[in-house]
Amino acid sequence: MNEPLLALTTGEPAGIGPDLALMRAVEDPFPAGRAPVRVVAIGDPELLAARARQLGLAVAIEPLEAQASVPAPRRGVLPVWPVALRAPVTPGVLDPANGDYVLELLDRALAACRSGRAQAMVTAPLHKGVIIEAGHGGFTGHTEYLRDACGIDAVVMMLATQLPAAMGGRALRIALATTHLPLRAVADAISESGLRRVLVILDTDLRRRFGIARPRIAVCGLNPHAGEGGHLGREELDIIIPTLERLRGEGLDVAGPWPADTLFTPHRLAGLDAVLAMYHDQGLPVLKFAGFGQAANITLGLPIVRTSVDHGTALDLAGSGRIDTGSLRVALTVAAEMALAAPGTR
Ligand SMILES: NC(=O)C1=CN([C@@H]2O[C@H](COP(=O)(O)OP(=O)(O)OC[C@H]3O[C@@H](n4cnc5c(N)ncnc54)[C@H](O)[C@@H]3O)[C@@H](O)[C@H]2O)C=CC1
Ligand SMILES: NCC(=O)COP(=O)(O)O
């Protein structure tokens, strides 16, 4: 395969997504140690040109026809598949009038991946609230939007980073059994069928997309001390333990449920390929404490490769230039590696 083509959606136009694409365009396109990639941004060319001026960045925005080939990367040039904004943008100020614009960016990237034109999509952050205010009531994020757009039942959100040397220097991958739910709804969402689906997807994609022959996965309990033998909640006894036993019988290496407060310690993590947390704020604060700005958000179970940054729209910093592009670099690198590991859609 040529260098993979990565379709980079520029996300919420009032946020830092456009800034990320522009700042990355002036970085070295061939950094040592990283697979060479071609990147095409998806967004409004005039928005990108205006943001480049605001940031004082010399970036040539090159709109491309849908079928035109995407050139090899050149520093200071940003190829763009154009999508028109619905309303003018002030950095930092959300406008529901652009909600459909943000979703159109995703649709364009997904279509390119599904047709084989792009090998992966990488998403800059969007703002869930403003998309809901734009009239998309059930919207909870890229993960579920792409699941539904692909017509599949389940996907898995996993964030991954490389731990600093002082923390063991190894990969830390944390997947979630539930994603964007109010905490009140989490316990009711833990079911045997749901857990089984998540663990099978996690195991399958760690093999297929990450080349791990027999993934070792540890599973957090839901309750403090993994339920303290049923005295602090019964989800472990009634749901999680039986599910893990069945999956072990089918050959998966799934251990637990372990108390989450001590699972994320270096000696417990040693030898693990991934941890499954039961809910968003059980797993992600750990990951972000260890690697914020150096992590990627990966959607497992899709027929295409999708990665994203580990942060949100940072409306407070849009147009300021005072942002870290580290997570975008990681998201692009991981997307390229995944695309090369398992070419094609499925
Ligand atoms: N991949 C995505 O689309 C994601 C979207 N979001 C959405 O973003 C919106 C805002 O979420 P928040 O919780 O406020 O998180 P946030 O990540 O946007 O901001 C949290 C803090 O981190 C800072 N920050 C974020 N990214 C940064 C960067 N690249 N460089 C330097 N500083 C950075 C912000 O300035 C802020 O102080 C929400 O609507 C949320 O749902 C959140 C996470 C991921
Ligand atoms: N906390 C992760 C997040 O909000 C990103 O979700 P998604 O948009 O990638 O589904």
Image (cartoon, rainbow, N blue to C red):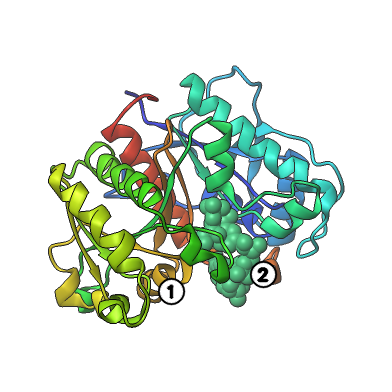
136 left or right of 152 in image: right
Which image quadrant shows ligand 1? Answer: bottom right
Q: Is residue 80 at least partly visible in the picture?
A: no
At x 81% / y 49%, what residue is drawn? 134
Please state which of residues 245 and 58 is positioned toward the viewer in this rendering: 245
Reply above or below: 68 against 204: above
Q: Which mark is residue 167?
A: none
Instruction: Inspect the image, locate mark 2, and give the three-letter code of the amino acid beneath it.
Output: Leu
Q: Check the picture and name the quadrant holding the N terminus.
A: top left
Task: Report x, y in % for residue 226.
Answer: 29, 75
Q: Which mark is residue 285?
A: 1
In this view, which residue lies farthest toward the top? 67
Reply above or below: 8 against 312: above
Categorize mark 2 by other alpha carbons within 10 Å: few (<14), some (14-19), many (20+).
Answer: some
Task: Report x, y in % for residue 54.
Answer: 74, 60
228 left or right of 312 in image: left
Earlier-in-chain disc, 2 versus 1: 1
Which quadrant holds residue 340? Answer: top left
Disc 2 Cβ-to-ligand 1 distance below 8 Å: yes
80 left or right of 251 in image: right
Q: Which mark is residue 317?
A: 2
Q: Check the picture and name the quadrant holding the C terminus.
A: top left
**Label 2 residue SS:** helix
Task: Report x, y in % for residue 99.
Answer: 76, 47
2 vs 1, front mark = 1
Instruction: Inspect the image, locate mark 1, and give the three-letter code of the amino acid beneath it.
Output: Pro
* Disc 2 to disc 1: CB gap under 8 Å: no
